[in-house]
Amino acid sequence: MKIGLDIMGGDFAPRATVLGAIAAYKALEPHQKLVLIGDKDQALPILEEHNFSPENFEFVHATQAIGMGEHPTKAITQKPDSSISLGFKLLKEGKIDSFSSAGNTGAMLVGAMFSIKTIPGVIRPAISTVVPKLKKGYGIMLDVGANADCKPDTLLQFGILGSLFAENILGIHNPKVGLMNIGEEEEKGNLLMLATHPMMKDTNSFNFIGNIEGRDLFNEKADVIVCDGFTGNVMLKLAETFYVLTRQKGFQDEFFARFNYEQYGGSPILGVNAPVIIGHGISSPEAIKNMILLSRSMITTKLIDKITSAFK
Amino acid sequence: MKIGLDIMGGDFAPRATVLGAIAAYKALEPHQKLVLIGDKDQALPILEEHNFSPENFEFVHATQAIGMGEHPTKAITQKPDSSISLGFKLLKEGKIDSFSSAGNTGAMLVGAMFSIKTIPGVIRPAISTVVPKLKKGYGIMLDVGANADCKPDTLLQFGILGSLFAENILGIHNPKVGLMNIGEEEEKGNLLMLATHPMMKDTNSFNFIGNIEGRDLFNEKADVIVCDGFTGNVMLKLAETFYVLTRQKGFQDEFFARFNYEQYGGSPILGVNAPVIIGHGISSPEAIKNMILLSRSMITTKLIDKITSAFK
């Protein structure tokens, strides 16, 4: 197994990424190899500083890097030697089994769709995010930004993608799928949700429990929260505010602690032909480590094969 | 001045509403009369219990009440003697200067649009909510539920309505208007926001500061937050969760204290021909009192006249 990591991605790269790789190494089994993609010359001194042998990793040297503010499509095409472009090349060629980066979100999305491409039958891949649940454990919300405008059949598919993730990665049996809406009743909602609700009600593809509301994000009603990428993105950023605020104000709490994005590593792109994870721009070594371990879970559970089968 | 209050509206009516009216009475000037609309026979024992003279109020007896779960349009037409129907009748006839209720939100919206009607030039009225700001004071977000689907020109008008509220009621000079979106850049967003942004950029009707994101709800970027009613409703309910959670967990904090909906009383419907406020279903006496005081502000500042002039 080869787990690919962009060591140039994120606000604190390459230090945070290399330190994250070291931390992950200790949790990996011998046959689970980390492939670090980026500027090897920058990585080596950090490893040396920590008395960590470079032999423990494989390296793919990249002479370019895509900045956080660069235009995704332009950057991907104009920087073929960037760590993100190279990562997707390796992933497409099967030389790595997963690719993750805390770098440019748009470039990761575009790169995935241009290289490994969408799984046949999937209309649009979704960026998903893990959300902490009040009682215990986690749920998943999707889409959180890949598709600002969605159609009902796209949302229906997000229910399938999210269910498979919840079942295989979060270990939730027969996960409950909720449609994010502005009322519990079937006749509530905007045009999109009014059209999506009956399709979800009719499906045998997942366990639809009906509409949920903004107040249900953290409770036990749904394990999989389906929404368009606009709504999901706004909710995610609002929820992050609260994590930041409780931290700033020194509130200590088990639930708010589980809010910490570092614990779940990153946001998987679901619906593409390989495990791809986008990390938070501010990823710390701990976040990078957990992104690597999430990549491993996506490989070992054969999540992509299961998604592919579901859409056959 | 006559301030109309539905004493049958809300989960704890008529006790909470009558006690709220008593509390408000002490803050009102002699010429500011409260008109209590509802079942007088239920109100009198509560007043007596508190040694409060019914002479301090005017009463309009209502033999019916609209329940929280009733279908708005049906309820309004089939219950002409309900407190909400009567309230709007009085408001339309000019016998009261404002009307507020913590009852059925839909019935309040439908009632307002059927009776006092939309201000000429306003495409769609919006339900607005006051949001606490981290540093100090409050901002306003609209729409939070009246219009699940919006068009760009409707959002543009929300900017005008929100600005006038922020200026007149919240006392903010030249309020900053932000468009809730999924990125700061002009080219970010769903189709609705992509179409709305240039219209807001071109307007002279308010001080547009550009796109804002979910994380900006409580910071100083914008005083007026414009969004469609679907997004606003989801955000509002998510934000309420945090208030509830911090309370449950016993976190004490000046900011989270200002989250308390009781402090701002209710959600004004902006864009109709009179001051109308919808209170939270769980309104306490404190919330009712502040809803009454907010009604008074909307009357004394002549907010409706100012909105009417702006749309001429």
Image (tube, coloured by chain):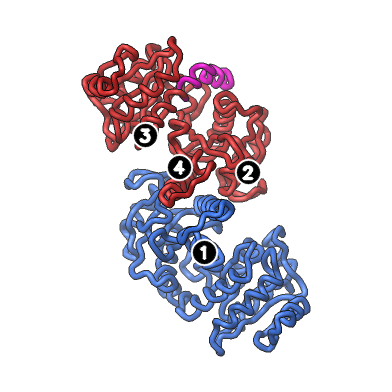
Chain colours: A red, B blue
Q: Residue at x 49, y 36 (%)?
A: A143
Give the mark toward the camera: 4 or 3. Answer: 3
Q: Is residue A81 visible?
A: no
Return the residue at label 4. A233
Dot 1 and dot 2 residues touching (CB under 8 Å): no
User: In this rendering, is residue B199 above or below A84?
Assistant: below
Q: Quadrant of the C terminus of chain B?
A: bottom left
Q: Residue at x 37, y 45 (%)?
A: B183
Instruction: Identify residue type, mark 1.
Output: Pro
Q: Residue at x 25, y 25 (%)?
A: A79
Instruction: Identify residue type, mark 2.
Output: Asn
Instruction: Identify residue type, mark 3.
Output: Ser
Tell me the chief SS of the magenta region.
helix
Return the residue at label 1. B125
Return the residue at label 3. A283
| Residue B179: image location, x then y, percent | 39, 54
